[in-house]
Image: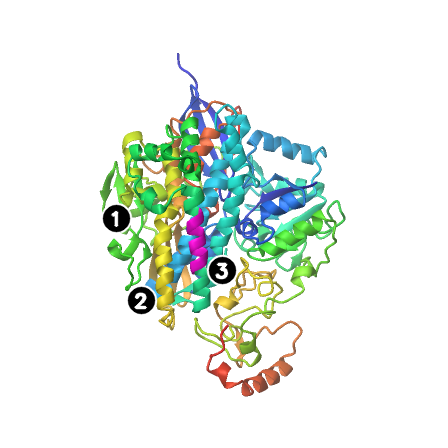
Amino acid sequence: MTTTYWIQGGGCGGDTMSLLSSGLPDIAELLHYLQIEPLWHPSFSIISAAEHDKLIERIINGRQELDILLIEGAVIRGPDGTGMFDQHRGEPKQTLIRALAQKANFVVAVGTCAAFGGFGPDTVIDACGLQFRRQQRGGFLGSDFLSRARQPVINLAGCPCHHDIIIGTLSALAQGVKLKLDEFQRPLQWFGTLVHQGCTRNEYHEYRIEESEFGEMGCLFFHMGCAGPLVPGICNKQLWNQRSSKPRAGVPCFGCTDPEFPKSTPFFQTRNIEGIPLSLPKGVSRAHYMVYKGMAAAAAPERLKQRTSRV
Amino acid sequence: MTIIAKRINIPVNRSEGDLEISVEIENNVVVNAWSSGTMFRGFEEMMIGRGPLDGLVITPRICGICSLTHLYAAAEALDELAGITPPDNALRLRNLALMCECIQSDLRQAVLMFMADFANQKVYAELPLAAEALRRYKPLSGKSVFSVIKESKRLLEIIAIIGGQWPHTSFMVPGGVTFRPELPELLQCRMICSHFHNWYEEQVLGCSLARWREVESCTDLDNWLAENPAHAGSEVGFFIRFSRQAGLDKFGGGNDCFISYDSLRLPEKSSIQGQSGHLLQAGFVKKEKLHKFDSRLISEDLRRTWYNSQYPPLHPEDGETLPGIPVINDDDRYSWIKAPRYQDMAAETGPLAEALIADDQLIKDIVKNQGSSVMVRELARLLRPAVFLPPMATWIDELIADHDAPFYHKVKEIPDGSGSGMIQAARGALGHWVEIRNQRISRYQIITPTAWNGSPRDTAGRRGPWEEALIGTPIKDEQNPVAAGHVIRSFDPCLVCAVHTISRRKKAGQLNLGI
């Protein structure tokens, strides 16, 4: 039996909604197959507030084992460090999050807000992620934090986090599989590939057939602000809702797994130097890239230039 | 003898975001209520200075359960600014996606969040239907819960096919949509829609849509229930029977004012017809009388909120969101939710308002004969898919027939100026008001359905709709005042959308209880 406690901070509930969209298993099947007992989830639990208080008390004084603490949404610290912009039963919720994090075997940040702060760091709510504030290590729990299983916070980035990643992480932890983490503590099993990988527009990307308008077939990286080649994610490998991904449907990737999401510059635009994006795919040198893309454009076949190849 | 009212605080979960209500109780009945959320997120502030299209990416992230609704409103506001009407196919796709999202929200809210309480054996063990309720609604394992999780996520695959993913896509853009689905994709959408339609008839209604449409009065409803076990045992049938046993048809009425905006803009060439160019019509109902709706009559009263208030209350196009210093333990100013008013009146919005404005015979007859209640409000939600599913199928058929026609009209740039997007979200009337100056967003104001329903008092001291609806609610057990939760949840509260809320701290000597 694996116990979980799901808490929501400054967020939109989108990760819970993503989780509900998982294919096989869906959330109800997963709990059943792996004997996971959700002690609390704010969207589903029906125990009374008094019973909920007792549950928290039991976890904190060690009488109830907590295997996995899942946090959705940023930790809200404002105003002035009091945390009172987000409270639970008259107390700042950040106090509860800290107390529970100290008791859990694993602490999982579900979504970019919980991992890096997401939509919270730059406004009066003064939010941050559990162990990061954007790219900066530290965050709410501090860079030295380790959960009882001697693990740092596991960051399931994404806005929202992909359902397969949430389900996969829960399965792995429930079955005692160790997850390898990248520099931003995202599990490499899912974040070791770029969103670009598997995009149906890749042939257009390859030959630099680029679009500046919506509703076309070509690549969205050069002008439309697509971050697919820049950020990790499985969106084009394990599809969303078992069906598709944003770039496949003509929506640029907004880079939501990146610690700096949401970026401060306008979406739907790529910042350029001489027609080549300011940000290049990870590890690529500008000079080589310019030569390569120039040659690729020259080699582009007519069927791509004419946009007759379907995406 | 004067009975001193007792004040209790009730945190409400199973809503989108946290909410706390405070009620005063006399003789086991609620006599006064204050509604206050527990979180402030400040999205409007985040929008200022950003690129003109950024609302399409940021506003969906206000809410995980109705993200597409915000996208739709944001795109309509930009259409208006750009002075463009999207092509018919784009309108069909936008509508189709919005309706899918609305239906998943309605069914998940009803079964996973609202009816979950019916499975609470500490509250309802004595009712004859309690054991069956547990089998159906036990959190994350009940029979109905299983089925709703499966079918709602399958319906959402339509949005993924046409928009890439759900939640949080941005496939609606000024001028249309980003994707031109091919025939195979449209055929898939059609199959998913048919599959869902069948499931809705079999499990939720227990009969065909055609049979259901014959139910036009309270008497018809009783006859329908008695007609056969499939009706009585369907989700709708069981909900009605359980609600009557639990007395949910007896309280939770509200203030008899209802508001809705025009929504789901009709394609020019379509077999689906409606007044005012929309499938759903705007309106304002006061004491069962329908009035013509005029958006200029909306204002936001900030007098009882923690915002720096303007007086007189302003139209959202001129409104601002300037947080003041929250004073905790104060009944004078007690919420981050603004108080939208229509002609100075608080108004309820959502499926019940939509049904009354659309002249739904059954819902009108229930309200006329039995008054508004928790039961009829939730019933209207459970029945909304019956209104949406037929036009959804028609629009997919029209897309299949006409898939070579445009999906996008080019928009060169968004000019300076202001625009609004006013639509019906799952929870009711949603408005976005955007102003662009020098190619940057200079103002962004949002009035959410939960701001209408969960608003605090206003300058004149009038309660918000669910504060009003709580009055008269029976509280049998102060340790577990589940009836108050039913009232609030029947409005399908979305606090992450209302975004402007913070909680009151418990007072000395005051009971702090939960449901």
Q: Which of marks 3 and 1 is in front?
A: 3
Disc 2 packing (10 Å; few <14; some 14–19; many ≥20): some
Instruction: Check disc 1 and report its element: helix, strand or loop.
Output: loop
Q: What element carries label 3?
A: helix
Q: In this view, does A117 lie above or below B355?
A: below
The N terminus of chain A appears in which quarter of the rendering?
A: top right
Give the image location of residue B231, x and y in percent: 40, 37
Tell me which secondary structure the magenta stretch mostly adopts: helix
Residue at far top of view: B1
Residue assigned mark 1: B293
Residue B195 falls within the magenta-colored stretch: yes
Q: In the image, which disc is placed on residue B83?
A: 2
Q: Which residue is nearer to you in this view: A50 or B271?
A: B271
Query: Label for residue B160?
Result: 3
Q: Are the numbered discs 2 and 3 placed on the same chain, yes or no? A: yes
Disc nearest the viewer among 2 and 3: 3
